[in-house]
């Protein structure tokens, strides 16, 4: 399986986790996807594994000359749509940083191209494979909490230092589509419902000189079957915190409640008294799973539909925050 990496700004380390699990995965080329991007860390990661990918300045030429099976796109977020289109138009399987695009117009073009291309697509919603979230999802699927009625999800990060492109909406895309996309994905994944409407707010206050980058956001979703969900997002986690992120979800159902916090899954249900900490379930990881799907050996936990639907939900939530209006799907 031949893979090219486009860009140096996202989570293409998922590719190398897959290489570690399956040495038949070969990174054959690396190129920037945005102006001024440094892809050196991915070249080094490949070389540490005994691979010698070619380094290109132009990712389009790389795709044309190397003709990979899969392209992993993780450039500046505002360039996702353009790079993803170039991949799909060449009928190459696409493993893409989220969101797939940062405008609704680009997303519509990508959907059309995907329908024509006949290839596989997965956005990098790798937190579905985190043991705690995966375990909680399996418990929900097993009926442990009955019918899902309410979801609260959280993404909280340390601010740390952020590159220049985070300061500008065009290149960054917004904190809801970037940070919030994981939590919005959990809402879609755990609920098993479709989005109906969203209202939201976001703020650049206290962003320490980072231009248009929002520091806080809050979204309220209505889904089919009258399921409601909230998503809170912030860069306010102190630098002294023990981990970079504080990711949480609470899913309340007709027979119980399951929560993920601090890397563990906790269940309260009608079946047993008290709160149970669930034993964590392991899985191979998102890129390994995606490669298996490309080979026809199974299904990735993140489908093309999931990738497009959650991207749309992120962009509509951002629009709701920008306009202070309820946005419908």
Image: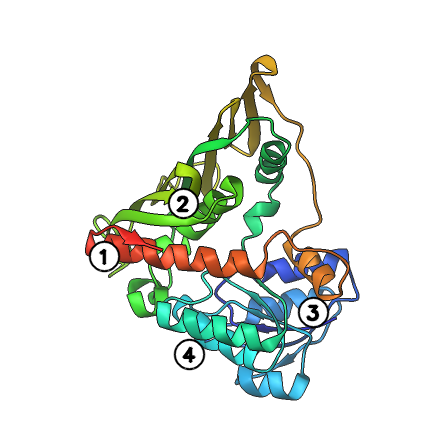
Judge whether 53 appears above or below 132 on screen.
below
Judging by the rendered image, the residue that carries numbered circle 2 is 157
Do callouts 2 and 3 mark residues in contact (Cβ within 8 Å)? no
- Residue 36 percent location from the top left of the image: 42, 77
Q: Nearer the viewer, mark 2 or mark 3?
A: 2
Q: Quadrant of the C terminus?
A: bottom left
Q: Is residue 159 visible?
A: no
Q: From the viewer's perspective, tell me whether residue 46 is left or right of residue 239.
A: right
Q: Can you say whether 308 is above or below 225 in the image?
A: below
Label at residue 47: 3
Pointer 2 local density, CA inside 10 Å: few below 14, some 14–19, many at least 20: many
User: 203 or 84: which is nearer to us?
Assistant: 84
Q: Is residue 94 visible?
A: yes
> Which is closer to the viewer, label 1 or label 3?
1
- Say which mark, if any, is on residue 322: 1
Residue at (33%, 59%) from the top-left corner?
174
Query: SS at mark 1?
Result: helix
Residue 304, horizontal then vertical, whole percent: 56, 61
Whether residues under marks 1 and 4 lie with C-beta atoms below 8 angstroms apart, the answer is no
Question: Which residue is labeled 4 in the image?
Answer: 35
Q: CA distance from mark 1 to mark 4?
A: 27 Å
């Amino acid at each position: 399986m031949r893979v090219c990496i486009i860009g140096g700004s996202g989570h293409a380390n998922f590719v190398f986790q897959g290489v570690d699990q399956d040495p038949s995965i070969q990174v054959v080329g690396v190129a920037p996807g945005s102006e001024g991007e440094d892809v050196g860390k991915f070249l080094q990661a490949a070389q540490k594994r005994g691979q010698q990918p070619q380094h290109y300045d132009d990712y389009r030429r790389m795709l044309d000359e190397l003709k990979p099976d899969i392209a992993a796109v993780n450039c500046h977020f505002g360039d996702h749509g353009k790079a993803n289109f170039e991949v799909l138009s060449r009928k190459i399987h696409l493993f893409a940083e989220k969101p797939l695009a940062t405008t609704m117009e680009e997303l519509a073009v990508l959907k059309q191209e995907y329908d024509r291309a006949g290839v596989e697509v997965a956005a990098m919603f790798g937190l579905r494979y985190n043991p705690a979230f995966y375990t909680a999802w399996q418990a929900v699927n097993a009926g442990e909490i009955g019918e899902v009625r309410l979801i609260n999800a959280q993404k909280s990060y340390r601010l740390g230092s952020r590159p220049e492109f985070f300061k500008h909406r065009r290149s960054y895309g917004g904190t809801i589509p970037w940070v919030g996309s994981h939590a919005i994905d959990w809402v879609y994944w755990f609920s098993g419902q479709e989005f109906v409407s969203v209202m939201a707010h976001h703020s650049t206050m206290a962003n320490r000189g980072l231009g248009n980058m929002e520091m806080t956001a809050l979204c309220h979703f209505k889904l089919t079957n009258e399921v409601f969900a909230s998503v809170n997002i912030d860069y306010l986690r102190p630098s002294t915190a023990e981990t970079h992120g504080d990711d949480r979800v609470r899913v309340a159902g007709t027979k119980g409640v399951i929560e993920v916090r601090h890397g563990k899954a906790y269940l309260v249900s009608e079946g047993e008294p008290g709160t149970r900490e669930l034993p964590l379930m392991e899985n191979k990881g998102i890129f390994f799973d995606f490669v298996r799907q490309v080979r026809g050996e199974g299904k990735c936990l993140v489908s093309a539909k999931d990738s497009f639907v959650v991207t749309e939900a992120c962009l509509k939530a951002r629009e709701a925050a920008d306009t202070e209006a309820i946005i419908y799907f």
